[in-house]
C-alpha cells in the first residue's frame, strides 16, 4: 500500500531527536500494519528503526504506549512488532504490556515470516 499523503519521514537515533508528536504522525518501528490499508490522515512517519541501535529507554517505550492508548481508530487492528534480538524483545514485550488500547492487538515476533502470517490470519 502506498502512503501517498506522507510529506516527511523523521529518522531519530536518540531520544533527544524525537520530534514533537502532532496530528498526522505515526510511529514506524518495523511493523507492517501501517502499510496494509490506506492511511490518508497521516502526513509524517517517525521511523524508530535506528533507535534500537542506540538503546531504547523505558521512557520512550512508555511514551509510545501512551500515544497509542489515547488514539481512536476507525477499526480494531493487529500490530505486529518485529523483535529479533533479546534486547528488542524485552522492550517490545514492555510495550505490549503497556498498550491498553482495546482496539489494538499487539503481538511480538522474532521473525518477519511469523509476524506476517499472524497479520494475515483471520480471527
Image (cartoon, grey):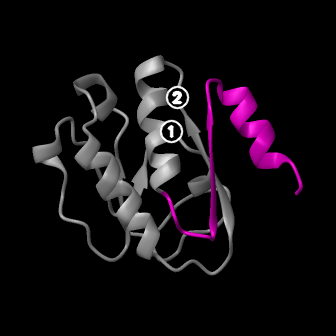
Drawn side of residue 13 relative to residue 86, left or right = left
110 is higher (above) or lower (below) than 29: above
* 121 falls in the magenta region: yes
Q: Is label 2 in a helix, a strand or a loop?
A: loop
Q: Which mark is residue 93?
A: 1
* Residue range (magenta): 99-123
* Viewport quadrant of the N terminus: bottom right
Coordinates of residue 90 in the picture (x, y in percent)? 44, 30
Residue reaching furthest to the front: 97
Q: Earlier in the sequence, mark 2 or mark 1?
A: 2
Residue 26 makes an appearance in the image:
no
123 is higher (above) or lower (below) than 112: below
Labels 2 and 1 touching (C-beta < 8 A) = yes
Mark 2 vs mark 1: in front: 1
Residue that carries the numbered disc 2 in the rendered image:
83
Q: Which mark is residue 8?
A: none
Coordinates of residue 74 in the picture (x, y in percent)? 63, 81
37 is higher (above) or lower (below) than 74: above
Drawn side of residue 55 relative to residue 123, left or right = left
* Viewport quadrant of the C terminus: bottom right
Q: Residue at x 32, y 53 (%)?
A: 62
Q: Residue at x 37, y 66 (%)?
A: 67
Amino acid at each position: 500500500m502506498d502512503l501517498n499523503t506522507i510529506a516527511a519521514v523523521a529518522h531519530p537515533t536518540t531520544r533527544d531527536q524525537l520530534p514533537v508528536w502532532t496530528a498526522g504522525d505515526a510511529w514506524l518501528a518495523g511493523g507492517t500494519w501501517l502499510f496494509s490499508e490506506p492511511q490518508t490522515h497521516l502526513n509524517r512517519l517517525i521511523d524508530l528503526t535506528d533507535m534500537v541501535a542506540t538503546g531504547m529507554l523505558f521512557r520512550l517505550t512508555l511514551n509510545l504506549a501512551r500515544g497509542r492508548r489515547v488514539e481512536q481508530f476507525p477499526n480494531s487492528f493487529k500490530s505486529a512488532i518485529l523483535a529479533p534480538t533479546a534486547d528488542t524483545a524485552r522492550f517490545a514485550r514492555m510495550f505490549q504490556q503497556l498498550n491498553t488500547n482495546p482496539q489494538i492487538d499487539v503481538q511480538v515476533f522474532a521473525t518477519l515470516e511469523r509476524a506476517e502470517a499472524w497479520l494475515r490470519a483471520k480471527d
